[in-house]
Image (cartoon, rainbow, N blue to C red):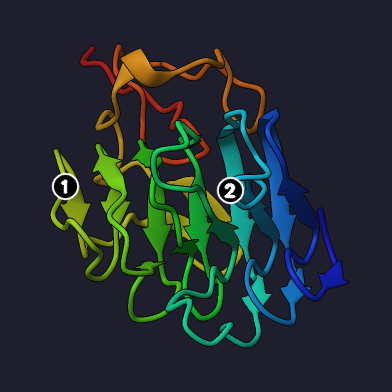
Amino acid sequence: FRNNYAVLGGAFYGQGPRELSISHSEFYENTSLTNGGAAYVGPLPMPADLDTAYIRFENVLWHHNIAGVNVPGDGYYGGALAGVTSIGSGDVIDIVNNTFTLNTPDAYGNNSNDVVRILNTIMWNNGTNSITGSNVPTVINSLIQGAFPGSPGVNNKLDIDPLFIDPTSNFRLSSSSPAIDMGDNTVLADTTDLDGLPRIVANIVDMGAYENLLICTPD
């Protein structure tokens, strides 16, 4: 998804009581006038939406996306992704093994009152805070730059450089990355990473969209 522009959700806008799964995808150089530089997802406003929505992003790379103007009163942008759920609706947004980098002014704008889970994910170099909004997401086994509601979460690495191969253009993990073997295997649905290569190499999944494939063994 590249070089798209919209008022809300630069490349993708999804709303309604449906199941949505996006995997092995890349969103880059998209722009929204308001929230969700690359994508905006959420249910219909209550009470019109009487069913629940399950939304899942797995093995997705988000970079160089821009959200323009914050909607007054929302308190979030979503330079790459903006998500909304209604309290008590049972709606779920899962972000699993994603990489967010070089998005403006943040990575994920969380205006969700129900379940948002950020798992095995890297959010680095997206502005002062990677996650904005006053609502509290569940963040587990992820590498996050900046403070976020509910920080520090569970088993997370905070403000630690993930050591990409090239922080401007190649967002695969270098061999010395602290994100290697730091994920949770139990949350995976896919068996391959964004390159289509094995998702687990050394018994434990890496954080982010790419698995590091270099394994060094003694002679």
40 or 208: which is nearer to us? 40
Direction from residue 54 to residue 147 in the image, left or right: left
What is the CA distance from the residue labelled 1 to the residue labelled 2?
Answer: 29 Å
Please give the count of numbered marks on the rendered protein.
2
Image point (74%, 75%), residue name: 32
Residue 130: quarter of image: bottom left
Single out the mark in the foreground, 1 or 2.
2
Image point (29%, 51%), residue name: 143
In the drawing, what numbered circle is on residue 14?
none
Residue 51: quarter of image: top right
Mark 1 / mark 2, whichever is N-terminal = 2
181 or 38: which is nearer to us? 38
Residue type at tag 2: Met
The secondary structure type at the circle numbered 1 is loop
Residue tagged by mark 1?
153
96 or 166: which is nearer to us? 96
Query: Is residue 18 depicted above or below 111 in this figure?
Result: above
* Residue 59 seen in the figure: yes
The secondary structure type at the circle numbered 2 is loop
Direction from residue 109 to residue 34 in the image, left or right: right
Residue tagged by mark 2?
46
In x, y percent, where is residue 90? 45, 31
132 or 172: which is nearer to us? 132
